[in-house]
Image (cartoon, grey):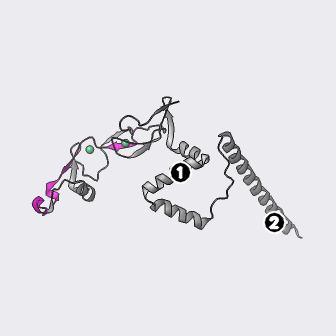
């Protein structure tokens, strides 16, 4: 073995050792983390790539009601699923357990109530949407039905304008704010 071969052999072995070290470190970290949380250690191997891909597609297309039922069953049957979803969906606010994701009553987006609220994260129109009748060209309400319907607001947003700024239904909110949860939080529990 010449000098160059020995060097390449040595660096190959070094990188194998380094990889193994990283794997062991990651494994022991995740192992310890799960144990410290009191979560059961999942001994099962991850799904292979094609199965995972199919599962992702199935999650995206399964009816919402069915998905919720499956999730509730898994929470019931598998403590580790319950712990993982609890972290994602529940948080503590003012000493109370509350749901982590809320719909903002100003802009209608959902937001994480546990995240620090940054001014400007919420853009909304404080006014109301009005019909721009002149934009509904050749639209006869007796024949085509009313102009101001939820369907038309969705399908022809450019044919409406906001009373606050005269911007069209497509325009970004004219007021910057922070997200605000709608109404009192549901089903709070003291801890
Ligand atoms: Zn506006
Ligand atoms: Zn908002």
In which quadrant of the rendered image does the N terminus lie?
bottom right
Residue 120, magenta (yes or no):
yes
Residue shown at the point (81%, 66%) measured from the top left: 8
Q: Is residue 102 left or right of residue 24?
A: left
Q: Is residue 124 left or right of residue 142?
A: right
- Residue 121: x and y in percent read 40, 42
Q: Quadrant of residue 38?
A: top right
Task: Decide if ligand 2 comes within 8 Å of the CB at mark 1.
Answer: no
- 158 over 94 or under it: above or below: below
Mark 1 or 2, nearer chain start = 2
Of residues 1 and 62, which is closer to you in this image? 62
Q: Is residue 67 left or right of residue 52?
A: left
- State which mark lies toward you, 1 or 2: 1
Secondary element at image label 2: helix
Q: Is residue 85 left or right of residue 132?
A: right
Residue shown at the point (58%, 63%) measured from the top left: 52
- 171 over 16 or under it: above or below: above
Residue 8: assigned label: 2
Of residues 97 and 24, which is closer to you in this image? 97
- Residue 91: x and y in percent read 51, 37
Assess disc 2: are there few (<14), some (14-19) or many (≥20) residues with their C-alpha within 10 Å of its C-alpha. Answer: few
- Residue 72: x and y in percent read 51, 49
Residue 73: assigned label: 1
Disc 1 + disc 2, Cβ < 8 Å: no
Residues shaded magenta: 118-143
- Residue 141: x and y in percent read 12, 59
Q: Quadrant of residue 150?
A: bottom left
State the CA–CA distance, disc 1 to disc 2. 54 Å
Residue 128: assigned label: none
Q: Whereabouts is ligand 2, in terms of quadrant?
A: top left
Residue 139, magenta (yes or no):
yes
- 66 over 86 or under it: above or below: below
């Amino acid at each position: 073995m010449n000098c160059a071969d020995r060097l390449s052999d040595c660096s190959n072995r070094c990188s194998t050792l380094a990889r193994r070290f990283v794997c062991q470190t990651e494994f022991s970290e995740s192992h310890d983390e799960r144990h410290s949380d009191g979560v059961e250690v999942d001994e099962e191997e991850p799904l292979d790539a094609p199965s995972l891909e199919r599962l992702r597609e199935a999650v995206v297309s399964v009816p919402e009601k069915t998905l919720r039922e499956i999730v509730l069953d898994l929470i019931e049957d598998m403590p580790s699923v319950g712990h993982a979803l609890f972290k994602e969906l529940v948080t503590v606010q003012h000493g109370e357990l509350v749901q982590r994701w809320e719909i903002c009553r100003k802009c209608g987006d959902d937001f994480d109530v546990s995240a620090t609220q940054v001014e400007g994260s919420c853009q909304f129109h404080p006014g109301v949407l009005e019909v721009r009748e002149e934009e509904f060209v050749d639209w006869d309400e007796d024949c085509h039905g009313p102009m101001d319907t939820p369907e038309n607001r969705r399908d022809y947003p450019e044919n409406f304008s906001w009373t606050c700024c005269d911007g069209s239904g497509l325009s970004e909110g004219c007021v910057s704010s922070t997200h605000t949860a709608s109404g009192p939080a549901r089903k709070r529990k003291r801890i």
